[in-house]
Image: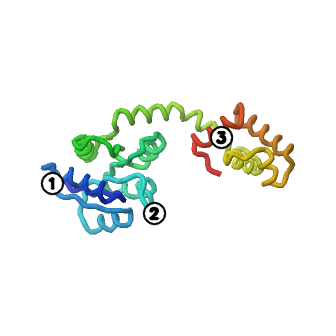
């Protein structure tokens, strides 16, 4: 019996194009299409599917959010226009069999699907390099996040305002404190987080996706 593939992407033209590529392969028996997670899960409940190609970004529940649940039931290959290391790492940790860029060669995409079905981890060499570089940075990220989590509630309030680009005067106005007190808080936060200045601090907050 041939392979059946479900393609979940919110762009109908792109989705149809991927389905067309798979339908041309003699090993692919059936392709299904869904525009969001709800539609995908309804489809999976009514049809036998061997593999899901899942877009990372979807309206409503995203592919990454649904991935841990879906990957428990069947193999999932992530498909995305984004190739940043954070998304790749999150997808692989959540159970994805692989991560493929949307601009991949059609033959490579079909082969990636077949490899995923065989239990292989599918990751383009360029994506693997990005992931490896990210993992090498991980200790620094973990240390930074650990230091942020140890800040006092007041310092976290100030940190959130720094992330929003507020000046010392703006921080003081927002928190109802003097500009001098705000400056003292900022200096102390830089010391606690081992950051040389507020610009590098703001960049680190963005790079490590720190939430407040």
User: Quick one: label 3, few (<14), some, or many (20+) residues within 10 Å?
Assistant: some
- Identify which residue is drawn at 86% across, 43% down: 180
Image location (x, y in percent) of residue 182 = 82, 45
Image location (x, y in percent) of residue 194 = 70, 33
Above or below, 185 relative to 212? above
Residue 45: mark:
none
Give SS at disc 2. loop
The answer to which of marks 3 and 1 sits earlier in the sequence is: 1
Question: How far is disc 3 from disc 1 in space, using C-alphas?
Answer: 52 Å
Residue behind mark 1: 2
Question: Which of label 3 and label 1 is nearer to you?
Answer: 3
The answer to which of marks 2 and 1 sits earlier in the sequence is: 1
Residue behind mark 3: 202
Question: How far is disc 2 from disc 1 in space, using C-alphas?
Answer: 32 Å
Question: How far is disc 3 from disc 2 in space, using C-alphas?
Answer: 29 Å
Residue behind mark 2: 60
Any part of residue 68 in sight: no
Image location (x, y in percent) of residue 151 = 73, 45
Above or below, 112 relative to 34? above
- Identify which residue is drawn at 34% across, 57% down: 9
Give SS at disc 1. loop
């Amino acid at each position: 019996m041939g392979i059946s593939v479900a393609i979940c992407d919110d762009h109908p033209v792109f989705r149809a194009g991927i389905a067309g590529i798979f339908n041309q392969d003699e090993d692919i028996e059936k392709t299904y299409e869904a525009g969001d997670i709800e539609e995908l899960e309804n489809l999976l409940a009514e049809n036998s599917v061997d593999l899901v190609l899942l877009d990372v970004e979807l309206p409503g529940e995203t592919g990454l959010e649904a991935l841990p649940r879906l990957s428990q039931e069947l193999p999932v290959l992530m498909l995305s226009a984004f190739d940043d290391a954070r998304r790749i790492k999150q997808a692989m940790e959540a159970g994805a069999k692989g991560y493929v860029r949307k601009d991949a060669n059609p033959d490579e995409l079909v082969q990636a699907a077949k490899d995923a079905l065989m239990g292989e981890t599918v990751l383009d060499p360029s994506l693997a390099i990005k992931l490896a570089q990210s993992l090498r940075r991980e200790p620094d990220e973990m240390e930074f996040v650990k230091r942020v989590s140890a800040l006092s509630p007041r310092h976290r309030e100030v940190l959130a305002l720094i992330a929003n680009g507020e000046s010392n005067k703006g921080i003081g106005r927002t928190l109802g404190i003097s500009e001098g007190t705000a400056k003292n808080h900022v200096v102390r936060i830089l010391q606690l987080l081992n950051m040389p200045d507020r610009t590098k601090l703001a960049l680190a907050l963005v790079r490590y996706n720190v939430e407040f």
